[in-house]
Image (cartoon, rainbow, N blue to C red):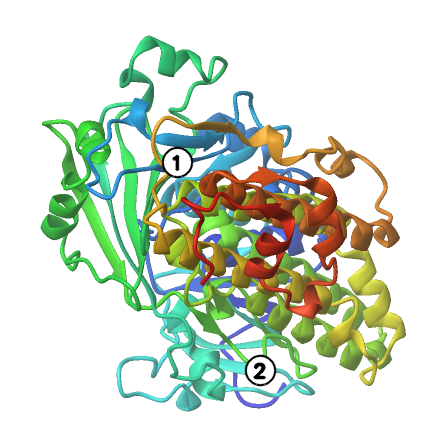
């Protein structure tokens, strides 16, 4: 290694948060002879933007990290996601709001993680396993107006040098898990300044809240008879924004609002403003009760960020929020860093085994993967509008859930076997952008967004946006109409069956939207006419109005207007 070093290690991870801490544990367990060091400028981990974990993280935590017993003992096992829909006046009580959620616990347990607690505990676990964890250690020259170029020398051949408050550290592999303050993204100018998706958030931790299971009447509580709702990851859905409710203890909740500034921008720039905004909603006012106290507050102005490169043949990598930031619904944060961590581990293992010839292809395919992932999850202009309608969101959520269990979960459970197979055999000039990297799936999701937005425009014309926002209950188990997709996670993956399953999902989604339009218009559903007019090719850009016009005779007096 070039230059003078005060400390040396094989792998240096900048950032001891959840992404960096789990990567250190993963590398220690998978490659126990690897000398690993983790540094972080913090000595205590403050609360941040809370979100649930998904099945990808559950599998990673249980099987790869061996953290299952710890998580079950110290953190909530989630009873699944739950969505509530309100009136335009935001005055419905919980039991009157329409609801989407499961009656039974989810088949794959997920966790509601108190991030400061797990990050602190990971530091201790990693230290006990032989990882050197240096808290209160900053990379130099990373303050406002300073250049990380003075602190970081990248040299993939001879070793990197990172100048810190604990001295200069030399390493072979460098991982930046330092969040949005990432020194590598600043050094290499990897994140453009353009605001591609102006989603913002404010959140806080509130003590003295009332449990969901202490509210509502007996009939409402008994509708979810097993675990109740108090351990759910709960979302209150509105036109242009949504509110999360995540339990941290019997009386403490993480509560936050996420909003699209293209449509709304509530005054939530301080803790007092956030609390006042939440109390404008009848259901949230009931949950906060008279005695809730705000204990911490945070805000983020932008929730879309993609580092243009996240893996390098020069032996540096990004993970966590240093790499990708997206809307926190659907546990995107834990999904994204779980996948990046696994791919970083694969790269380092191949590098150590002397398989240098496959490293360019690994980098090529891994970066295609993260770009594709980001584009699939990036919210369209009308997406946040649709979230406030039970009708629109139920159809979109059913499609998303089916795609998720058809593709995303099986891929994660087998540690991205197909991706790695292609990465190790294709080289760097393959057509993976349009095939195995999710190009067709991305277009399916884009078409679903387009049709959902068209549905909203059509029901808006007749003021039917809120038509089913009161008094409805949809068991999320009904999303798996074939009763096959959720069971796939226990079977060997056959990726040749996944496109036919996506085609079935798209047909169900379109039929659901068109049937609802026919119902709202007072028309008569005709399955044969729908089948005749429906184009199963989502790349054909068939409009919802065309499907609707061709599917049924509409009642002449109350037809839903085409956009």
How busy is the neighbourhood of tag 2: few (under 14 within 10 Å), some, or many (20 plus)?
A: many
Left-right relation of 18 to 288:
right
- Residue sitting at x 71%, y 77%: 363
Q: Contact, CB < 8 Å: mark 2 with mark 1?
A: no
SS at mark 2 in the image? strand
Residue 33 is drawn in which quadrant? Answer: bottom right
- Residue sitting at x 58%, y 80%: 309
- Residue sitting at x 82%, y 85%: 429
Residue for badge 1: 468
The residue closer to the viewer here, 260 or 316, is: 260
Q: Which of labels 2 and 1 is toward the front? A: 1
Whether residue 414 is visible here, answered yes or no, is yes
Whether residue 53 is visible here, answered yes or no, is no
Work out which quarter of the rendered image holds the N terminus and state it.
bottom right
410 shown above or below 347: above
Left-right relation of 217 to 519:
left
Q: Looking at the picture, how far across and down is residue 345, in whole percent?
A: 69, 61
The residue closer to the viewer here, 560 or 500, is: 560
The residue closer to the viewer here, 545 or 214, is: 545
54 shown above or below 139: above
Q: Looking at the picture, how far across and down is residue 169, in whole percent?
A: 50, 76
How busy is the neighbourhood of tag 1: few (under 14 within 10 Å), some, or many (20 plus)?
A: some
Residue 160's tag is 2
59 shown above or below 346: above
């Amino acid at each position: 290694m070039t230059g003078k070093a005060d400390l040396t290690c094989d792998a240096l991870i900048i950032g001891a948060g959840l992404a960096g801490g789990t990567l250190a544990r993963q590398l220690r367990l998978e490659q126990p002879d690897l000398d690993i060091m983790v540094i972080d400028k913090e000595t205590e981990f403050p609360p941040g933007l809370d979100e649930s974990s998904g099945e990808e993280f559950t599998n990673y935590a249980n099987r790869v990290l061996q953290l299952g017993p710890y998580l079950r003992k110290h953190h909530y096992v989630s009873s699944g996601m739950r969505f509530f829909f309100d009136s335009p006046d935001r005055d419905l009580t919980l039991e009157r709001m329409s609801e989407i959620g499961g009656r039974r616990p989810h088949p794959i347990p997920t966790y509601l993680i108190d991030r400061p607690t797990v990050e602190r505990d990971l530091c201790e676990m990693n230290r006990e396993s032989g990882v050197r964890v240096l808290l209160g250690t900053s990379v130099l020259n990373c303050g406002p107006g300073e250049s990380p170029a003075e602190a970081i020398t990248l040299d993939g051949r001879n070793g990197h040098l990172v100048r810190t408050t604990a001295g200069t550290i030399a390493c072979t592999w460098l991982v930046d898990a330092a969040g949005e303050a990432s020194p590598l993204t600043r050094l290499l100018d990897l994140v453009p300044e353009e605001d591609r998706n102006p989603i913002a958030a404010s959140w806080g931790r509130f003590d003295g809240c009332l449990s969901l299971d202490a509210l509502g009447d007996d009939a409402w509580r008994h509708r979810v008879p097993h675990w109740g709702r108090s351990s759910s990851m709960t979302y209150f859905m509105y036109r242009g924004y949504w509110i999360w409710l995540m339990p941290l203890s019997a009386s403490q909740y993480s509560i936050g609002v996420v909003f699209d500034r293209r449509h709304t921008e509530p005054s939530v720039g301080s803790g007092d403003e956030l609390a006042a905004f939440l109390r404008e909603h009848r259901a949230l006012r009931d949950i906060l009760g008279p005695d809730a106290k705000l204990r911490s507050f945070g805000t983020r102005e932008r929730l879309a960020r993609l580092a243009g490169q996240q893996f390098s043949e020069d032996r540096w990598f990004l993970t966590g929020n240093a790499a990708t930031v997206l809307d926190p619904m659907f546990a995107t944060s834990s999904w994204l860093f779980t996948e990046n961590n696994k791919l970083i581990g694969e790269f380092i293992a191949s590098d150590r085994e002397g398989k240098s010839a496959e490293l360019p292809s690994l980098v090529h395919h891994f970066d295609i993967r993260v770009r594709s992932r980001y584009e699939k999850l990036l919210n369209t202009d009308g997406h946040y509008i649709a979230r406030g309608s039970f009708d629109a969101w139920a159809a979109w959520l059913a499609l998303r859930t089916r795609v998720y269990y058809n593709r995303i979960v099986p891929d994660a459970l087998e540690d991205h076997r197909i991706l790695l197979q292609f990465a190790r055999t294709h080289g760097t000039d393959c057509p993976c952008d349009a095939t195995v990297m999710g190009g067709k799936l991305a277009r399916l999701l884009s078409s679903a967004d387009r049709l959902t937005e068209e549905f909203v425009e059509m029901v808006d014309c007749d003021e039917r946006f809120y038509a089913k926002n009161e008094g409805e209950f949809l068991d999320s188990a009904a999303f798996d109409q074939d009763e096959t997709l959720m069971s796939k996670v226990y079977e060997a993956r056959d990726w040749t069956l996944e496109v036919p399953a996506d085609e079935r999902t798209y047909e169900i989604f379109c039929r659901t939207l068109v049937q609802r339009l026919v119902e709202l218009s007072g028309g008569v559903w005709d399955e044969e006419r729908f089948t005749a007019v429906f184009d199963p090719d989502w790349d054909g850009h068939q409009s919802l109005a065309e499907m609707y016009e061709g599917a049924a005779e509409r009642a002449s007096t109350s037809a839903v207007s085409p956009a």
